[in-house]
């Protein structure tokens, strides 16, 4: 339902209505919520669809979906019997002064289609409650049905008809954590038989079948990825003589075509999900890890950006994008390239010798590109936590991943290709990041003042943030302050019209380089191919529902991120439950609205709610005692027992 409402907000073509959606469209049309013009259905200007926010004293705000506009004030919540989280259609109240407002005309479902609930016992009676709120799950179960289950049994719930869909396991079992985080967004690893059959139907690449593709198999391309990577999206080659950088990307669009079973599943998933122990791919593994993946020593179809660089200005002075065949000569991991940069790894054969030669020269260029980029854009030091778990799904250890020269080299190569792709269309899928609003910036300044950092406001936000980062470095708080700066900014998202990328400092930017794991990139490939081929019919098809697609993909990105974060939170909660009463070193990371700390001990990254120690200061190092753990909600509660002198 939510997807339908988003598409109706922007305009839904009659041919794009799914059979199960037609009854709702006809009903909305009869009630005049929507209009029909030239076979396109769209919300009447009087009506908006959205999610009901927190209900207080019979009032709430409608979080409008499908467009980025102000929330609407609702004051008739009680008469409509709507609840927080309901998906509703509201009629705008025009002509009223003050906050934009509306009235509820229909409840059409729940914003969250799925949730997770578990069995609890209280006063000798069992009940089924929501895992996150402890409120009744809404499923009607008789006492004898409840007694068939054990305390802690966990279930996936359909919130549209309030039925149990699946028993996931028991809350005491660490293996249930993955099922919980996936169930709340209806994510799954398995592909349908139809999808698997289609994926298995593709044959290995035979170059003779692609005479129109550029044959780049003699160029010494290589891939550089994490040591655990199985899907290789991108390969690079640098020609020193012509100062030309080649960025070859897996040509997913050759295999995943519109309307097909694989494409439908890819739209639904939109992103690959990466958990500590495994990935849940957007595409079947026959494609993501094999035929599309730019593996070494085999022919692969690719979509290549060829970019000529002016080394004096560090600008791309000419570029073209085209379909090609490549034959990657080596698969490197980041550690190997870093060892080469440190003089610890040398070439084992003539092929590696060529690759190392151009990699060394390319590093000089990408280092300069990064330095130039950071004069306008930002360099934030928010470290990425890596978690490792054993076969029983318990934490073994954690580390923070740090950017190394090999990461930086690949990043700036990909940024160049993404920038060049964005220059080729005026409407499509852009990756935008709007500047922060003034209120958030003022709140940031207040938080920094609380740690003794007084901000000297400069002529531009860039200069001001650079000065803040300089002070943070002197205080040994670079990562913490950068996290605050990031939190003060708008969230990057996908949009059909360009608005620039504040964080990177780019006038235009998109995602082109990861079509194996991001659906946005696949759409960009299709659009660029249509433009190159002067295929206006294909181009118009790609763009037909682009506004709705951008909203949907942005939402799926947040879902994937939430799943990854919540999975780790559940692992930390289980670790903490085994350590109740033990004392660990931590750092205060938040004082408003709640006092929170982050574990900075042998194990790192767990987050605590501090219940005792209210005089602790932001970013102060402390020792905390773990007092209580809520496994269901994945929350850890602790007390400050001692202040710690910080190591410089």
Image (cartoon, helix red, strand yellow):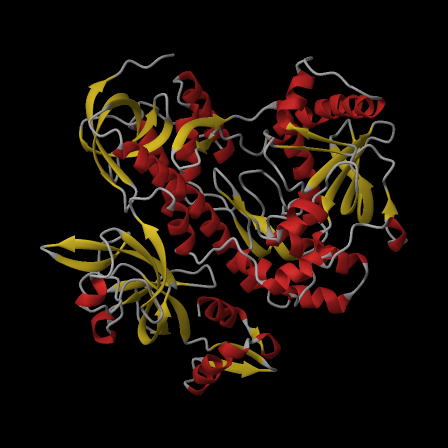
Which quadrant does the C terminus fall into?
top left
Residue drawn at x 74%, y 16% is 346
Where 103 sits versus 53, above or below? below
Where 583 sits versus 94, above or below? above
Q: Position of residue 292 (x, y in %)?
A: 71, 48
Q: Position of residue 444 (x, y in %)?
A: 36, 35
Please give the count of numbered marks on the rendered protein: 0
Residue drawn at x 77%, y 54% is 203
Q: Position of residue 598 (x, y in %)?
A: 33, 29
Residue 530 horizontal side relative to residue 370, left or right: right
Residue drawn at x 45%, y 80% is 24
**Quarter location, residue 569:** top left
Residue 328 horizontal side relative to residue 467, left or right: right
Q: Position of residue 254 (x, y in %)?
A: 75, 56
Front in this rendered view, residue 427 or 29:
29
Furthest-front residue in view? 148
Where 285 sits versus 332, above or below? below
Whether residue 88 is visible, yes or no, is: no
Where 537 sits versus 71, above or below? below
Which quadrant does the N terminus fall into?
bottom left
Furthest-bottom residue in view? 30
Front in this rendered view, residue 543 or 163:
163
Residue 436 horizontal side relative to residue 146, left or right: right
Front in this rendered view, residue 528 or 292:
292
**Quarter location, residue 138:** bottom left
Furthest-left residue in view? 123
Front in this rendered view, residue 472 or 558:
558
Residue 621 horizontal side relative to residue 267, left or right: left
């Amino acid at each position: 339902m939510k997807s339908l409402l988003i598409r109706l907000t922007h305009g839904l073509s009659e041919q794009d209505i799914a059979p199960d959606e037609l009854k709702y469209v006809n009903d909305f049309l009869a009630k005049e919520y929507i209009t029909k013009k030239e076979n396109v259905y769209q919300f009447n200007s009087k009506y908006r669809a959205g999610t009901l926010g927190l209900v207080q004293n019979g009032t709430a705000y409608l979080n409008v979906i499908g467009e980025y506009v102000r929330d609407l004030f609702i004051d008739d919540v009680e008469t409509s019997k709507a609840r927080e989280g309901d998906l509703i259609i509201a009629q705008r109240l025009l002509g009223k002064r003050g906050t934009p407002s509306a009235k509820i005309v229909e409840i059409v479902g729940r914003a969250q289609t799925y949730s997770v609930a578990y069995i609890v016992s209280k006063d000798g009676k069992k009940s089924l409650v929501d895992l996150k709120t402890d409120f009744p799950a809404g499923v009607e179960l008789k006492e004898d049905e409840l007694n068939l289950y054990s305390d802690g049994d966990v279930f996936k719930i359909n919130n549209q008809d309030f039925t149990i869909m699946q028993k996931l396991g028991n809350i005491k079992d660490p293996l249930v954590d993955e099922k919980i985080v996936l169930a709340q967004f209806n994510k799954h690893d398995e592909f349908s038989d139809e999808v698997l059959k289609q994926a298995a139907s593709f044959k290995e690449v035979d170059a003779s079948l692609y005479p129109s593709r550029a044959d780049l198999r003699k160029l010494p391309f290589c891939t550089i990825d994490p040591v655990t990577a199985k899907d290789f999206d991108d390969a690079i080659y640098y020609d020193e003589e012509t100062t030309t950088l080649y960025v070859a990307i897996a040509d997913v669009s050759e295999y995943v075509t519109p309307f097909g079973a694989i494409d439908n599943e890819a739209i639904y998933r939109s992103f690959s999900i990466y958990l500590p122990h495994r990935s849940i791919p957007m595409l079947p593994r026959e494609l993501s890890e094999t035929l599309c993946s730019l593996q070494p020593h085999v022919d692969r179809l690719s979509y290549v950006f060829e970019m000529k660089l002016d080394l004096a200005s560090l600008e791309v002075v000419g570029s073209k994008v085209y379909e090609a065949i490549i034959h990657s000569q080596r698969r490197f991991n980041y550690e190997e390239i870093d060892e080469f940069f440190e003089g610890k790894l040398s070439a084992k054969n003539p092929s590696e010798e060529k690759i190392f030669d151009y990699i060394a020269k390319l590093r000089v260029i990408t280092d300069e590109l990064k330095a130039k980029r950071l004069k306008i854009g930002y360099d934030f030091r928010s470290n990425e936590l890596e978690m490792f778990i054993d076969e029983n799904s318990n934490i073994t250890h954690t580390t923070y991943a740090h950017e190394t020269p090999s990461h930086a080299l690949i990043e700036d190569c990909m940024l160049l290709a993404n920038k060049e792709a964005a220059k080729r269309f005026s409407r499509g899928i852009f990756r935008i990041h709007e500047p922060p609003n003034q209120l958030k910036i003022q709140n940031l300044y207040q938080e920094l003042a609380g740690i003794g950092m007084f901000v000297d406001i400069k002529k531009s936000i860039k200069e001001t943030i650079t000065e803040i980062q300089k002070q943070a470095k002197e205080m040994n708080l670079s990562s913490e302050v950068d996290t605050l700066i990031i939190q003060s900014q708008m969230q990057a998202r996908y949009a059909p019209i360009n608005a620039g990328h504040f964080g990177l400092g780019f006038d235009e930017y998109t995602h082109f380089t990861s079509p194996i794991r991001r659906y946005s990139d696949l759409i960009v490939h299709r659009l660029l191919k249509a433009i190159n081929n002067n295929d206006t019919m294909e181009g118009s098809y790609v763009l037909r529902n682009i506004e709705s697609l951008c909203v949907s993909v942005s939402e799926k990105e947040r879902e994937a991120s939430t799943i990854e974060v919540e999975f780790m939170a559940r692992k930390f909660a289980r670790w903490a439950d085994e350590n109740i009463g033990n004392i660990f070193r931590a750092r205060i990371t938040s004082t408003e609205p709640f006092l929170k700390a982050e574990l900075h001990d042998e194990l790192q990254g767990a987050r605590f709610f501090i219940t005792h120690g209210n005089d602790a200061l932001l970013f102060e190092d402390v020792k905390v005692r773990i007092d209580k753990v809520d496994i269901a909600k994945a929350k850890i509660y602790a007390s400050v027992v001692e202040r710690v002198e910080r190591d410089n």
